[in-house]
Image (cartoon, rainbow, N blue to C red):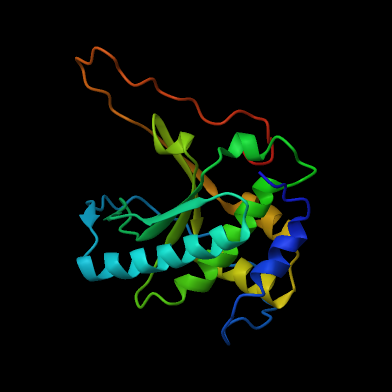
Amino acid sequence: MPPLRHLAGITLILLSFSTDGSLHADPSPPPPLVSHPPNHHHYEVVPHSELEALSQASRRIASMMDAILPFESTVWPHAIRDELGRTGIFLAPSIPFNTLATNPDEDPLKGWIVCAILATGKYIETIPFPVHHVCLTDQTGMRGELWCYDIDIATVRYLHRHLASGTLTAEQAYQTLIARWKKITRPTTLPKKSPNPVPIRSSPSSSSKRLHS
């Protein structure tokens, strides 16, 4: 795998993709974190028309990331609104977070995260209805003890605009993001009588202390 030696280079390469007029410098501070009080919302399947639009945007995000990064990424819409009634998109690299975080000098994990935010921020604007959040996970978080880092869409838009306008560096965007995201973990329910139960996988180790704080 070719190394990602310069995090700032990811931003420069991404900005070579076409942008639209929404990317103007915004001097405002990051949006306030939204508190979601429990509302006992019932899970609801996303309508087909909305799912198609989310899927199309997901393909564009993945294509943009794959054209830049030296490894593939999977992007998909959540077909069911969560317990808060939110619509969202999931992103996962083909390489586990722990592996990407083993060489901090090359910043491959930070590069993937910044790339994910820029690509998602760009194509989320093409969706004709509200998208509420983005979740970052990896192959280990997609099975066993399910986990993801949940980011509200206002933060994604804020970081995207500031990165694209040059008012935030990639490192600043990364630090802002990890200070605001929320880790969500949901253990899977295993069959009671399974001769070969799937082991519950633990969350990624602390190889990247800032990531898992």
Residue most extreme to the top: 195
Q: Is residue 128 left or right of residue 152?
A: left
Q: Is residue 186 left or right of residue 109?
A: left
Q: Is residue 52 left or right of residue 96?
A: left
Residue most extreme to the front: 1
Vertical position of residue 140 compared to residue 175: above or below:
above
Residue sitting at x 58%, y 87%: 21
Residue 195 in which image quadrant = top left
Residue 85, image x, y percentages? 30, 58
In depth, the one of 40 and 198 nearer the eye is 198
Residue sitting at x 76%, y 61%: 8
Quarter holding the N terminus is top right
In depth, the one of 200 and 35 nearer the eye is 200
Residue 142, image x, y percentages? 41, 38
Q: Is residue 23 left or right of residue 145?
A: right
Residue 147, image x, y percentages? 45, 38
Residue sitting at x 26%, y 50%: 40
Vertical position of residue 136 compared to residue 16: above or below:
above
- The total of numbered circles placed on residues is 0
Residue sitting at x 32%, y 70%: 53
Q: Answer yes or no: is residue 32 visible.
A: no
In depth, the one of 135 and 213 nearer the eye is 135
Residue 37, image x, y percentages? 38, 53
In depth, the one of 210 and 62 nearer the eye is 62
Vertical position of residue 9 compared to residue 99: above or below:
below
Residue 98 in which image quadrant = top right
Quarter holding the C terminus is top right
Vertical position of residue 124 compared to residue 94: above or below:
below
Residue most extreme to the bottom: 21
